[in-house]
Structures are given as C-alpha cells and as structure tokens.
C-alpha cells in the first residue's frame, strides 16, 4: 500500500512541477518567436545591405559624372572670360565712334537750325523783294500811263 500511495503521489504533479512545465513551454514559445524575429531581421539586414551597395555604386557614378561636368564647365568659363575680354576691348574701341557720332548729330542739328533760319530770312527777303518788284511794276505802269496822258495832250 505504501508503494501504491507513493505511486499515486508520483502521478500527481506538484504546483512547482506544473510551474516548471509552464515555464518550459513559455520558454519554447519564446524561442520559436525569437527565431522568426531573427529570420525577419536577417532578411531586412540583407535588403539594407543591398540598398547600401546600390547607393554606393550610384554615388560613384554620379561623382564621376560631376567630375567630368566640372572640367567641362571650367573650360566653358575660361572661354567665356576670353570672349568677354574681347568684347570689352571692342566696346572700348567703338566708344569714340559713338562719341563722334553724337557730336556729328549735334552739329547736323545745329546746321538744320541755321538752315531753317536762313531759309526763313531768305523767304522774308523774297517776300519783300516780291513786294518791291510789284511796286516797281505798278510804278512803271503808272509812269507809262502818265506819259501817255501827257503825250495825248
């Protein structure tokens, strides 16, 4: 009987054993979830690593292109500066021409003013001359008529 009693007691789990079994099951479940989490984390890290590699390759390509563009821009700036110096030199050469043209246009304007005044004076002298000419003709005609009247008498 004693054996049977020990056997029944052995078949019964104690609270400590039950707690240990629950802890073991919880730990097993935790390990399964941690394994899944680590697998997902590993895939994410592979994707990040691939993205970083692609980014580095793109940066290398862009850096090479920027270097080429920088050298071309530098050449264009040198040519632009040369062209600008040439244009500035030609503008300095042309400046006296524009000054002379301005002086010439002022002289032509003065000449036009003088011509207008001369034409105006000639016009007024012509009018006076025409008046004198008309008066002279009238005077001759009057003299002829007077001579005729005196000759008729």
Image (cartoon, grey):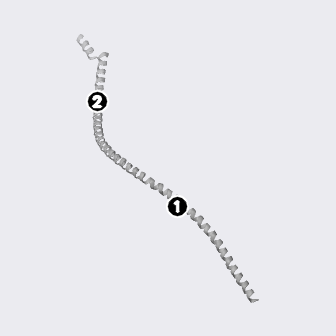
> Going 69% across and 82% down the picture, which residue do you hit?
141
Q: Which residue is mark 2?
A: 38
> Going 43% across and 54% down the picture, which residue do you hit?
94
Which one is nearer the viewer's eye here, 65 or 57? 65
**Can you say which quadrant of the picture contains the N terminus?**
top left
**Can you say which quadrant of the picture contains the C terminus?**
bottom right
- Image vertical order of residue 84 relative to residue 32, above or below: below
**Camera-nearest label, 1 or 2:** 1
> Going 51% across and 59% down the picture, which residue do you hit?
105
| Residue placed furthest toward the right | 153
> Which numbered tag is attached to residue 108?
1
> Which numbered tag is attached to residue 3?
none
Secondary element under disc 1, as helix, strand or loop, is: helix
Mark 2 surroundings: few (<14), some (14-19) or many (≥20) residues within 10 A: few
- Image vertical order of residue 89 relative to residue 63, above or below: below
- Image vertical order of residue 131 relative to residue 61, above or below: below
Is residue 128 visible from the viewing direction of this image?
Answer: yes
Residue 116 vs residue 19: left or right? right
Snapshot quadrant of residue 109 = bottom right
Q: CB under 8 Å between callouts 1 and 2?
A: no
Which one is nearer the viewer's eye here, 94 or 75? 94
| Residue placed furthest toward the bottom | 152
Secondary element under disc 2, as helix, strand or loop, is: helix
Is residue 14 visible from the viewing direction of this image?
Answer: no
């Amino acid at each position: 009987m004693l054996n049977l009693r020990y056997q029944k007691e052995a078949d019964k789990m104690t609270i400590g054993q039950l707690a240990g079994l629950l802890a073991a099951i919880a730990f097993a479940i935790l390990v399964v979830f941690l394994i899944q989490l680590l697998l997902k984390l590993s895939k994410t890290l592979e994707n990040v690593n691939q993205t970083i590699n692609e980014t580095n390759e793109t940066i290398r390509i862009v850096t090479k292109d920027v270097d080429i563009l920088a050298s071309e821009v530098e050449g264009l700036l040198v040519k632009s500066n040369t062209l600008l110096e040439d244009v500035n030199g030609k503008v300095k050469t042309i400046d006296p021409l524009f000054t002379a043209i301005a002086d010439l246009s002022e002289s032509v304007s003065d000449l036009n003013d003088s011509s207008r005044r001369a034409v105006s004076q000639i016009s007024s002298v012509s009018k006076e001359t025409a008046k004198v000419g008309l008066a002279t003709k009238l005077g001759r005609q009057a003299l002829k008529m007077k001579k005729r009247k005196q000759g008729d008498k």
